[in-house]
Image: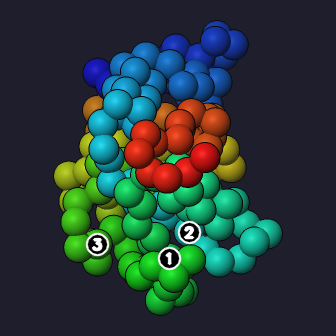
């Protein structure tokens, strides 16, 4: 089964959040991130410079990744169209990067699962034990307790440098 189970936490206490980015989820999402050409939906992307959603969206874009903003309160982010939810996206994302509080993240995960999406990256602060348990139960790839900005690389040929 992809991802991590509650029993795999390094602390041995059974807390799913202790599991961190291990197992198949880490290898498949990281491989896709750095060797493929994934479309990344950044849920919580914003123009508010005090929010991680703004920093992450711009960082991935600057590095040459294909990103799409998901924010139900904005029409545009960094000059790009912003979409109300995952259902509104014009193209199916390869990775759903979630940068919203756990209460909102749970609904995003449920929507994504209903749409058949299979890769979820929960930024630090977006996760909860219930969300991790849901992802494990669904058998989808997921990454928790790791920041996408530290795992992503500058894409070749994007003119950044």
| Between discs 1 and 3, the one toward the N terminus | 1
Image vertical order of residue 34 relative to residue 44, above or below:
above
Q: Which residue is mark 2?
A: 45
Q: CA distance from mark 3 to mark 2?
A: 14 Å
> Is 81 or 98 nearer to us in this picture?
81
- Which quarter of the figure has residue 44? bottom right
Image side of residue 116 versus residue 107, left or right: left
Counting other residues with Cα less than 10 Å from the Cα at mark 3, is it few (<14), some (14-19), or many (20 or more)?
some
Image vertical order of residue 152 relative to residue 13, above or below:
below
Q: Which residue is mark 3?
A: 89
Q: CA distance from mark 2 to mark 1?
A: 6 Å
Tell me, yes or no, whether the two marked residues, 1 and 3, touch with CB atoms within 8 Å.
no
> Is 123 or 150 nearer to us in this picture?
150
For label 1, the SS is loop
Q: CA distance from mark 1 to mark 3?
A: 11 Å
> Is 3 or 63 nearer to us in this picture?
63
Tell me, yes or no, whether the two marked residues, 3 and 2, touch with CB atoms within 8 Å.
no
């Amino acid at each position: 089964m992809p991802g991590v189970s509650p029993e795999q936490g390094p602390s041995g206490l059974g807390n799913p959040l202790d599991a961190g980015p291990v197992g198949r989820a880490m290898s498949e999402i990281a491989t896709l991130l750095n060797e493929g050409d994934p479309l990344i939906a950044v849920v919580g992307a914003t123009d508010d410079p005090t929010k991680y959603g703004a920093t992450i969206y711009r960082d991935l874009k600057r590095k040459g990744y294909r990103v799409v903003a998901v924010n139900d309160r904005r029409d545009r982010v960094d000059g790009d169209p912003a979409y109300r939810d995952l259902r509104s996206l014009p193209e199916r994302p390869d990775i759903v990067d979630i940068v919203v509080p756990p209460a909102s993240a749970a609904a995003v995960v449920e929507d994504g699962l209903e749409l058949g999406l299979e890769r979820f990256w929960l930024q630090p602060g977006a996760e909860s034990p219930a969300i991790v348990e849901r992802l494990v139960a669904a058998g989808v790839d997921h990454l928790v307790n790791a920041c996408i900005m530290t795992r992503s690389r500058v894409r070749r040929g994007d003119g950044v440098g």
